[in-house]
Amino acid sequence: MPDNDTREGELSYQERLNISVVSIGKTKQLLKDDIKDTLAAWHSGRNVDKQCYHIIGPAGVGKTQICDQIVEELTEEVFGSHNKKNPDDQKKFEIIMIKSPVLSRDDFIIPFPVEQGDKTMDFKMLYSDWVPKEVGSYGIFVIDEFSRGDHQLQQLLWQVQNEYAVHTFQFPKGWFVVSTDNPDDSEYSMDNLEDAAGLRRQLHLFVEVNAQDFLDYAIKQDFHPYVIEFIQTHPEYLYDFQSQKIGAVYANPASYEKLSDHLWKMQLRRGLDFDEIEIKASGLLNTNMTRLFLEFARDQKDINPKDIFQKFKTVKPRVEQLLKNKDASKLGEIMVGFCTYLSTSMPEFHDTELKNTLDFLLMMPIDTAALFISAIDGFDRTGPKFKYMTKIHLALMDRSPRYKSEFIDPLDAAGEGKSR
């Protein structure tokens, strides 16, 4: 969920706007589906309006990143069959992304004098390359950090968002507009120019930090294993809100992607130098988070969820010690990491992995063990994560009577208010 730790009596930006909070993955799907729905409606003869989306979320969460992904995926999903049939007439979605904080109104439109035949002067408008002009083209016009632009620029961009036009020039019909912003909270320097008319013409969404979405992206993009496994083990470290609030360097999805690139570059040419990694990572994550990351990467002191799944005997003594110490917080953290690892990596499993999973689950206290079933219930019933986790659940039910008698039945009893 978004971090709404504002001063007492003060509403967060998301609360003031009173809008939905969704994951970055859900936001991406909403935008893609809406564009495809709009195109389909036009094709059927119904001239529905386009929708301008206003995506609000913490810096580094991936707001602009999904726009690049959307145009790539829409090109394949909308024009894929056409492009295969007509290789000489390739259609695609394009993207124009502007950075509001570094632009002015004059970067978009400039009047210039034109001499008329009777020696009188008239003025025409010169439109920049940022204005899409090609008739019949398709794309997304992204206004990044809209509320950090100056007021004159914001007023021009209101027209872009509301009318899909600059001055009298109308965008090609196939172009859609998305604007992004950080929350108007104390951590960000914003200059909002809001009015009721502007607010009503956009569809506003607040994007929350979501480890599942980050890991799906990281695995697909082949992030360095240390980064993937660190966040699988500690999804709570994906975004360091507390460091952000005090103005320190803070861990976030974008900084982990940069760290992954540094790890790969170093490893592929000369091997990992942990002293150098410490310097670079501290500039991306901060020194405290870097210490935790290096402890994980170097010493593997944390209980890696992959080890639970593949070689539980090697980490079982450490789990037993946590049980002995009644460290419920750490046990819960490990269970969340285990579920995150399974649902994002979706590793193959056989009897060994199922036995390891069973032994681990049966060791957990009832409230911690319940997180496994809660994780399954939390996924979209039609999605691959739910299907994978359910496959493990059914395999355990099928292969081990103990799973039902010592795990499922006690959970059901606890749910009915009975003791284990």
Image: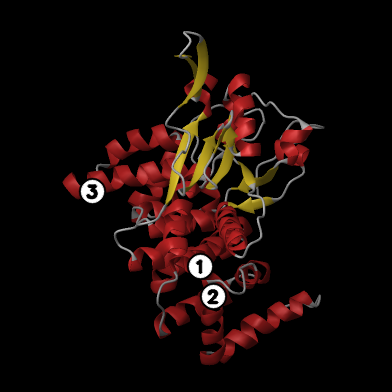
Residue type at mark 1 is Ser
Cβ–Cβ under 8 Å for marks 1 and 2: yes
Query: Is residue 304 something that shows in the picture?
Result: no
Q: Residue 66: image x %, image y %?
A: 49, 49
Identify whether 288 is placed above or below 86.
Answer: above
164 or 288: which is nearer to us?
Answer: 164
| Horizontal arrangement in the rendering, residue 11 relative to residue 129 (left or right) | right
Residue that numbered label 1 is attached to: 343
Cβ–Cβ under 8 Å for marks 3 and 2: no
Q: Residue furthest top?
A: 119
**Which numbered marker is on residue 273?**
none
Q: Residue 331: image x %, image y %?
A: 57, 61
Residue type at mark 2 is Met
Residue that numbered label 3 is attached to: 267
Q: Residue 284: image x %, image y %?
A: 41, 35
- Disc 1 from disc 2: Cα separation: 7 Å
**Disc 1 element:** helix
| Horizontal arrangement in the rendering, residue 176 relative to residue 81 (left or right) | right
User: Tag 2: Cα neighbours inside 10 Å, few (<14), some, or many (≥20)?
Assistant: many
Count the numbered circles shown.
3
Q: Quadrant of the C terminus?
A: bottom right
- Disc 3 from disc 2: Cα separation: 33 Å
Cβ–Cβ under 8 Å for marks 3 and 1: no
User: Tag 1: Cα neighbours inside 10 Å, few (<14), some, or many (≥20)?
Assistant: many
Q: Residue 392: image x %, image y %?
A: 51, 80
**Disc 2 element:** helix
Residue type at mark 3 is Gln
